[in-house]
Amino acid sequence: GQNIDQPTEMTATEGAIVQINCTYQTSGFNGLFWYQQHAGEAPTFLSYNVLDGLEEKGRFSSFLSRSKGYSYLLLKELQMKDSASYLCAFADSNYQLIWGAGTKLIIKP
Amino acid sequence: ETGVTQTPRHLVMGMTNKKSLKCEQHLGHNAMYWYKQSAKKPLELMFVYSLEERVENNSVPSRFSPECPNSSHLFLHLHTLQPEDSALYLCASSQEFGTGGSEQYFGPGTRLTVT
């Protein structure tokens, strides 16, 4: 079967670093996506990993280990505007996205 | 207009009503999607269209009926809905369907309440 799991909620402090983990199980895999969704808004694309390793994009980095079925999103120098839900999703063998329920990140001053 | 637009943004309907949700993408993409997002649940893919042809129908009840008249427009026709259908309905588009890294661009969604 297929499943994907990420923490429901995390809290971090402004200026700090936070890592949001995502684990998945699937027989067919065509890459893993991270999206950001502010309350009441549409999800917006953050990153895509299809090979193992770390992809860095400004304050955000995403890591993938295909053998472990594991990814994380790393957010550095946290800002209040980073308060949002972070959704991970993998593309299955049919290229359909299977989504996690999202991690609500709360940033405190 | 840029990106992906959806109308209406909010909709309240009775169980016996018929209504339609509209989505338009201005990105020149070839694939469009309907998703359902309920509170604290994962996004559920409902329908996928690629080059105006339906690709996937993930066991969606027949009270939801999609229509894709051209590659820029997507509709979701609703009839005899149930209260559990209340949710945020998101439309998305991507350059292609069936390629690994094709990121999806989402519209702002329609918040549907069924009374």
Image: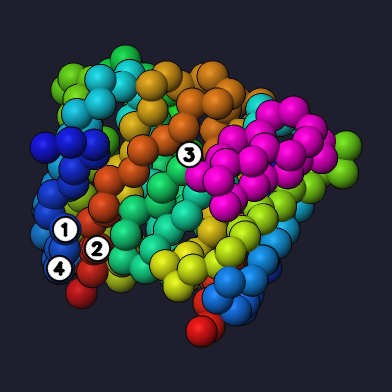
Write down the chain letter for disc 2: B
Q: Earlier in the sequence, mark 2 or mark 1?
A: 1
As helix, strand or loop, the secondary structure at mark 4 comes to strand
Q: Residue at x 59, y 50 (%)?
A: A60
Measured in 3D between alpha carbons, the distance from the residue under mark 2 to the one under mark 4, in whole angstroms, is 8 Å
Q: Residue at x 37, y 68 (%)?
A: A39
The label number, if any, that marks residue B92 in the structure image = none
| Residue A41 in which image quadrant | bottom left
On screen, residue B66 above or below A44: above
Measured in 3D between alpha carbons, the distance from the residue under mark 3 to the one under mark 4, in whole angstroms, is 25 Å
Q: Residue at x 11, y 59 (%)?
A: B17
The label number, if any, that marks residue B9 in the structure image = 1
Q: Can residue B101 be found in the magenta stretch?
A: no
Q: Earlier in the sequence, mark 3 or mark 1?
A: 1
As helix, strand or loop, the secondary structure at mark 1 comes to loop
Measured in 3D between alpha carbons, the distance from the residue under mark 2 to the one under mark 1, in whole angstroms, is 6 Å
Q: Are marks 4 and 1 on the same chain?
A: yes
Q: Amino acid at mark 4?
A: Val
Q: Which one is in front, B24 or B78?
A: B24
Magenta-colored span: A46-66
Mark 3 vs 1: CB contact within 8 A? no
Q: Amino acid at mark 2?
A: Arg
